[in-house]
Image (tube, rainbow, N blue to C red):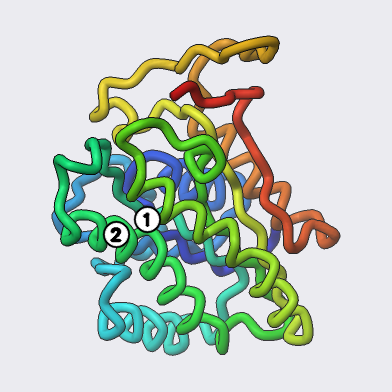
Amino acid sequence: MKNLVALITGGLSGLGLACVNRFVHQFNAKVIICDLPSVSSTSIPSSSLFLPTDVTSEIDVKNVFNRIKKDFGRLDVLVNCAGIVLSQQIFEHSTEDFNRVLDVNTNGTYNMIQQMIPLMINNGVIINTSSVAAFEGRRGQTAYAASKGAIIEMTQPLAKELASMNIRVCAIVPGAFDTPMLRKLRTTVPSTPGNFPLFPARLGSTDEFAQLVQTIVENPLLNGINIRLDALLRMPP
């Protein structure tokens, strides 16, 4: 974990910010944060580099690539945390709403990966963020579940394709975490049906997500897998 150069999307809040803090404070890594300029945070480490970025914009992401290439010459870790959520019944939202969720969550992730690969050859780790909704989406989560399911299905093909370049690819599948996104939805830990007790019966902390990111980076045998981080959470209808 020494002398790492890490890029974290959605790094101004929630899961992304926890990853930023872990890389900066515990490993003195060089961290580049990509997030929308409209997102505010007072807890960004002063040693990190913030680049206002719309992950769906090829121009924005190309500018990020050029800046990293100029300042650091390489990228060791890419953590894709940028995402949005839509929780509405299918008859309540438009096709435009559906496409917007897929554009940010799926296309934005793909856009970052595709453009950062040249900087990661020979020693790269890509970590994407999915959701348990990809497997057990609830009512009103059609768009969100579709976007996160696509992240799951990208893991194996990307890992196989990039293995020859010495780049690993994994995805984390978080359950219910204490993030601004979850609080915005006014959601509590969902009950677990049948014989599947939730343990521990609480929201996950964002640093617990960041701990798993660290483990993936440190363990070279973790590749091509989707790791559930959910305390046995199984979503009810």
Q: Residue 35's mark?
A: 2
- Mark 1 is surrounded, within 10 Å at the Cα level, by few (under 14), some (14 to 19) or many (20 or more) other residues, namely many
Rendered location of residue 3, percent (x, y): 64, 66
- Mark 2 is surrounded, within 10 Å at the Cα level, by few (under 14), some (14 to 19) or many (20 or more) other residues, namely many
Q: Nearer the viewer, mark 1 or mark 2?
A: 1
Asked whether residue 3 is in view, the answer is: no
Residue at the spot 79% in from the left edge and 57% down from the top edge: 222
| Residue 17 relative to residue 120: left or right | left
Q: Residue 82's mark?
A: 1
Label 1–label 2 contact, CB within 8 A: yes
Q: Split into 4 quadrants, where in the image is the C terminus? A: top left
Residue at the spot 56% in from the left edge and 51% down from the top edge: 23
The residue closer to the viewer here, 127 or 74, is: 127
The residue closer to the viewer here, 112 or 131, is: 131
Q: Residue 40's mark?
A: none
Question: 66 above or below 34?
Answer: below
Say what secondary structure mark 1 lies in: loop
Rendered location of residue 66, percent (x, y): 38, 88
